[in-house]
Image (cartoon, rainbow, N blue to C red):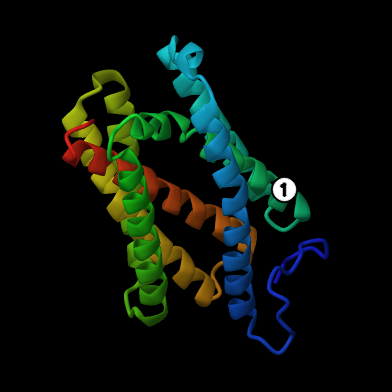
Amino acid sequence: MNQSPDTRDYTGLGSHTQPQEVVLRKTYGLLGLAFLPCMAGAFFGSQFNFAPLFSNYWVAIIAFFAFFYGMSFAIQKNRYSQTGVILLMVFTFGMGFMLGPILQYSASLANGGKLVLMAAAMTAGVFLAMAAAARRTRMDMNALGRFLMVGAVVLMVGVVANLFLRLPVLSLTIAGGFVIFSSLLIMWQIRTVIDGGEDSHISAALTIFISIYNIFSSLLRILLSLAGDD
């Protein structure tokens, strides 16, 4: 593999383990670590007053996309070094912080806490199911990768369109699409690591984290809508 010496091993695996299995287990270890700053960010975000930020809709949107894509690019550029790990922790904190508005809204509802827990439990179930499926699937990963690429374009077109239209029905449709897309992306990424197509646990952890984040936030939006509170 092409890893630099300063990339730490979060699993303590010995050299007797197959390289692909080492990357996968280091991915899981780093992914678990990444959720600590994410949860801290979500806590601080739920206490933050977002009203001044949302006074200008487009400034908030541009800031979000600048942070998301800027940090993702920086992490990928440093995916073989300890700098990438540090950037990933900053990224997950920021993404957790950005859950603040929907968490605040959920907390204002009588059953909001239950809906958040339900979304979290469903997200965990999806991840475990996709991780298990990745080890057993005989699906052509190249074909799935092409499908996901097309799906990503379709979803982004929908997201951009809804920035202008702001239609609740389209928003929920996009949320459902993200649940399906992100679930398949988890399986594809894990299978790619197993097959030796990904040699950076930092890059793999980033992809899986974003997928889990999208699943959770999308499921929560759907649950809020089904509860009649969206």
What amino acid is at disc 1? Ile
Instruction: Check the image and report above or below for 63 versus 151.
Output: above
Instruction: Check the image and report above or below for 81 versus 228.
Output: below
- Mark 1 Cα-neighbour bin, 10 Å: few <14, some 14–19, many ≥20: few
Q: Is residue 159 left or right of residue 42?
A: left
Q: Which residue is mark 1?
A: 86
Write the residue at 35% across / 75% down. Answer: 133
Write the residue at 49% across / 31% down. Answer: 46
Q: Single out the residue that lies furthest toward the bottom.
A: 16
Residue 132 location (% of width, % of height)? 39, 76
Which quadrant of the rendered structure holds the N terminus?
Answer: bottom right
Closest to the observer, 135 or 55: 55
Q: Is residue 153 visible?
A: no
Residue 175 sits in quarter: top left
Q: Is residue 212 left or right of residue 90?
A: left
Residue 208 location (% of width, % of height)? 49, 57
Q: Is residue 79 visible?
A: yes
Q: Single out the residue that lies furthest toward the front.
A: 110
Instruction: Check the image and report above or below for 100 versus 88.
Output: above
Instruction: Check the image and report above or below for 193 versus 95.
Output: below
Residue 153 location (% of width, % of height)? 34, 42
Which quadrant of the rendered structure holds the C terminus?
Answer: top left
